[in-house]
Amino acid sequence: MRTKLTLILLAISMGTLPAQPDQRIARTPKVNYDWRPGFVSITEAAYAFGLSETSIPLSKYYYGITTQAGYQFTRNIKAGVGAGVHRHNDGTLFPLFVDARYSFSAQEIVPYISAAGGLAINPEDPVNQTWLYINPSAGIRYVAANRVGVSFSAGIIAMSGGTNRNTFLNFRLGLELKGKK
């Protein structure tokens, strides 16, 4: 008897699942606008310190700024290309990169994961001192106002150039601006 009753209740609850809305409703207009597709500009200040061998050039720390232009395809997916400047302990590198971000469904405070990668060019010797790097990270973004978000993330950067390999733990503080529709 209990088995039949359980199966009937399960069938009733499964029958009501298609009646649930597939679109969430935002609590505030700023969050509603944040979910819309469109152009995105993200500017981030970064600081990182070396994790492995720090006696080789460009391996102790760096600080810098990057900016990227991208597009938000869905509420959760953004991608873009960017450039910046990183001042290392022994020189300056100019990164050129692609960045993809996946935001988890949320309201005003949005956790996300990011994957960036590209080239870091040394202007003193661009042919022999160009570094290839990848930067996976995780962070949170606060939707501050319509078309404005503030983000903080932490990640690992692995760089390879010539015979050297450098690894950094980096922190980024960013400002995200969305274009008008």
Image: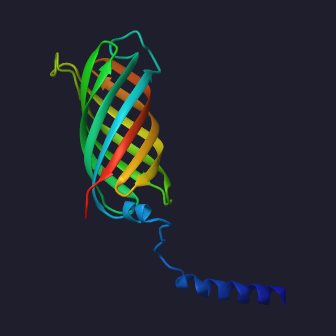
Q: Quadrant of the C terminus?
A: bottom left
On the image, which quarter does residue 120 sit in?
Answer: top left
Q: Residue at 48% of width from left, 71% of height from top?
A: 24
Could you tell me residue 158's position as x and y percent? 38, 29
- Residue in front for this viewpoint, 94 or 53: 94
Is residue 108 positioned above or below 14 on the image?
above
Could you tell me residue 150's position as x and y percent? 41, 45
Is residue 77 positioned above or below 122 on the image?
below
Q: Residue at 72% of width from left, 86% of height from top?
A: 9
Figure disc tally? 0
Please name the colour scheme applied to the rendered image.
rainbow
- Residue in front for this viewpoint, 4 or 10: 10
On the image, which quarter does residue 136 sit in?
Answer: top left
Is residue 6 left or right of 27 when viewed as pictured?
Answer: right
Is residue 84 left or right of 112 when viewed as pictured?
Answer: left
Q: Residue at 26% of width from left, 19% of height from top?
A: 92
Q: Quadrant of the N terminus?
A: bottom right
Q: Residue at 47% of width from left, 43% of height from top?
A: 138
Could you tell me residue 173's position as x and y percent? 41, 37
- Residue in front for this viewpoint, 68 or 149: 149
Is residue 128 positioned above or below 100 on the image?
above
List the single residue furthest toward the top.
55
Is residue 180 positioned above or below 52 on the image?
below
